[in-house]
Amino acid sequence: AQSVTQLDSHVSVSEGTPVLLRCNYSSSYSPSLFWYVQHPNKGLQLLLKYTSAATLVKGINGFEAEFKKSETSFHLTKPSAHMSDAAEYFCVVSARNTGFQKLVFGTGTRLLVSP
Amino acid sequence: SQTIHQWPATLVQPVGSPLSLECTVEGTSNPNLYWYRQAAGRGLQLLFYSVGIGQISSEVPQNLSASRPQDRQFILSSKKLLLSDSGFYLCAWSQLAGYTGELFFGEGSRLTVL
């Protein structure tokens, strides 16, 4: 079975400072991993995805994440936060060798960005 | 390009009343379709998914049902709403062929049951 744990329910940063959102996963199979972002009262948008190619994955809006198998982690980072980054972020895991890939969502991390 | 429409955006319903949320996808054919529910402070819970017309799989036992009367139409229903049905409902689609795990979400429907 697959699961993800987002270690922080809230993260607060100042504009211009680095962002780190932590995610640990558990999967019986070689996983695919994703980060989605949700702005208030909106649907979710894919930020980036890891599917067994390069372990450092670059996404939209300057975000990137590194797949570390030894640590079972897939943390999301950004060098410099922008006010528009304030949103909820979800780490997601999918088992790639199942017939129908069901995504398992973490409980989310709310990113607060102050001026 | 593909688009997904979901309505209504907000809904306030009394306990015991029926529910119908509708989702349509444009610009693609044979999509996988999904209904998720997001409760306050929690992650997304998969309620139903469909790989084709009339093919519905339920993930959790509940007061809700889903139907797919057309290839790109997905409907979430209830005959009698419960207080616990309140939440933010999200429809999503993904490619059937060459599925990579990416879901494309609608804007969501916020349901409040009073």
Image: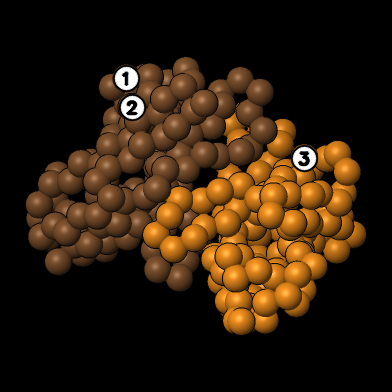
Chain colours: A orange, B brown
Residue shown at the point (77%, 40%) measured from the top left: A51
Q: Chain of mark 2?
A: B
| Residue type for callout 3 | Thr
The answer to whether the residues at label 1 and label 2 have Cβ atoms under 8 Å apart is yes
Nearer to us in this view, A115 or B38: A115
Q: Chain of mark 3?
A: A
Q: Where is mark 1, residue-wise? A: B70
Q: Where is mark 2, residue-wise? A: B73
The spot of residue A74 in percent (x, y) is 77, 59
- Please say if A24 is above or below B94: below
In the rendered image, the quadrant that contains the C terminus of chain B is bottom left
The answer to whether the residues at label 2 and label 3 have Cβ atoms under 8 Å apart is no
Measured in 3D between alpha carbons, the distance from the residue under mark 2 to the one under mark 3, in whole angstroms, is 29 Å
The spot of residue B108 in percent (x, y) is 37, 50
Nearer to us in this view, A91 or A61: A61
The answer to whether the residues at label 1 and label 3 have Cβ atoms under 8 Å apart is no
Measured in 3D between alpha carbons, the distance from the residue under mark 1 to the one under mark 3, in whole angstroms, is 32 Å
Find residue B103 and report its image quarter: top right
Q: Which mark is residue A51?
A: 3
